[in-house]
Image (spheres, grey):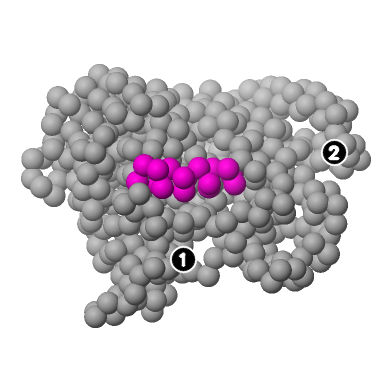
Amino acid sequence: MWRAGAKAKLAALTLLGGAGAAAIATSDDPSSTFKICTIVPLRLIRDSVTAATMAFDYQYSLWGLKEGSIEWLRAKHEVHNRCAYRLQELCFRNGGIYIKLGQHIGQLEYVVPREYVQTMRASMLKRCPVSSYDQVRSVFVKELGEPPEKIFAEFDPVPLASASLAQVHAAKTHDGEKVAVKVQHTHLTDTAIADIATVGLVVNFLHWFFPAFDYRWLVDEIRESAPKELDFLFEARNSEKCLDNFRRLSPHMADSIYAPKVYWNLSTSRLLTMEFMDAAEITDVSAMQKLGIQPIDVSKLVSQAFAEMTFKHGFVHCDPHAANMMVRPLPSSKWNCFGKRKPQLILLDHGLYKELDFETKTNYAALWKALIFADVNAIKENSVKLGAGEDLYALFAGVLTMRPWSRVIDPSVDHLVLEGKDSDRSELQMYASQYFSQISELLRRLPRVILLMLKTNDCIRAVTHALIAYPKDSISLVCNVKAVIQL
């Protein structure tokens, strides 16, 4: 095992050495790039040590224990916790793409061991790196030729929020308009390629040591999506396309969906200046109720909006976690006699979108329709069309609905409703643990666009759970049915 780890280190160092030399030769800031390339090998060493330690811990902790026994389950739980913490610390120490990876893992509930999900969810959105004001100024000077205090009438040096790839500052233009400025963390573009390569080495090593642990698809997804998410102009175009789709294809609810206006003259691939949104966070029930907005109405709006994007537009926002959505009263709505107002959903962070071709969109819609009506033959037929295979279609249905197969095919009206009880969660976690290797194989087979749809479903489900007293996933499903019928 340790010889394999040494080989992995050597291969990575060779790869990154060549990549570093190329980066220095082509960079317009060689000294800065050289500094980056001296850091990358240190990251690789951390990666290799972490991967080898995790592999050894699993091998040693479970050695000699009968699979499925109480002792084996206890030991497995403990090693999951230890290794999840190691992976978390690796992500924070390396930063950038690694934190994005950790956030992605935290959104794969019931797909990766729950210890990893819980560890990543508890920290990855709260401990993101923060660039210093000097670093922010350097980005402005490089991108727009002047520091922020000259470009704006006011610029708050303390960020409003920080994420894995960028942080956001409040500012005011010389015309008096309040704006939000998204600034990419310095050097992130240069280190991203090397980071993806080193993450790939770790995942490949773990797969070599544990064949059932096959999450190479996750690295492929990050490799494809990261360059797009690092281009803020691409994000800006996505936001405008999203709104245009609602105006053209879903005019009945176009006013209920909003994205901040982009200030194109103050935006580049590493800086994005947008309209400042004075609105409540999507899960802040108390704040929205003070505005006269009912959480149940917001839940319905979120579900309907993403059903429209998925089944009609074929252009889907694939990172709709709570930090990327806000809500405010619909500007044209008035207080009714019950003290309520209609909500308007504000979508943020448009860097990660996926397009569904007509065939995929149609098959995915037909699958949801089959799931709702517990049509076993149609579930199998459309799961196979989407790549699950005839042997794993039942598992695919379970992962998609978060229900065991016995509930998926139950003809009762509420057979897919999740009530958020501890017994529900325990059942699902046991289900995922029992079929871990099969789930890994399923994820390897499925097209990446479907994998992102699974992630999107989980994000929407989490928001829905936070908005209403008990999670009526049937709300989402009803909206899906409506969208299917309208195809």
Q: Choose between 19 and 159: the one closer to the eye.
A: 159
Q: Is residue 245 magenta?
A: yes
Q: Where is residue 347 shown, x and y percent of the image?
A: 48, 54
Badge 2 or badge 1: first in the primary sequence: 2
Instruction: Tell me where residue 74 appears, x and y as whole percent.
Output: 37, 47
Give the CA separation, mark 2 to mark 1: 38 Å
* Amino acid tagged 2: Thr
Between residue 354 and residue 95, name the one nearer to us: 354
Tell me which corner region of the image, top left, top right, bottom left or bottom right, holds residue 151. Answer: bottom right
Q: Residue at x 85, y 34 (%)?
A: 27
Residue of label 1: 281
Position in image of residue 450 (x %, y %): 39, 32
Q: Quadrant location of the C terminus?
A: top left
Above or below — where is 320 with respect to 396? below
For residue 253, side relative to residue 378 (left or right): right
Residue receiving disc 2: 33
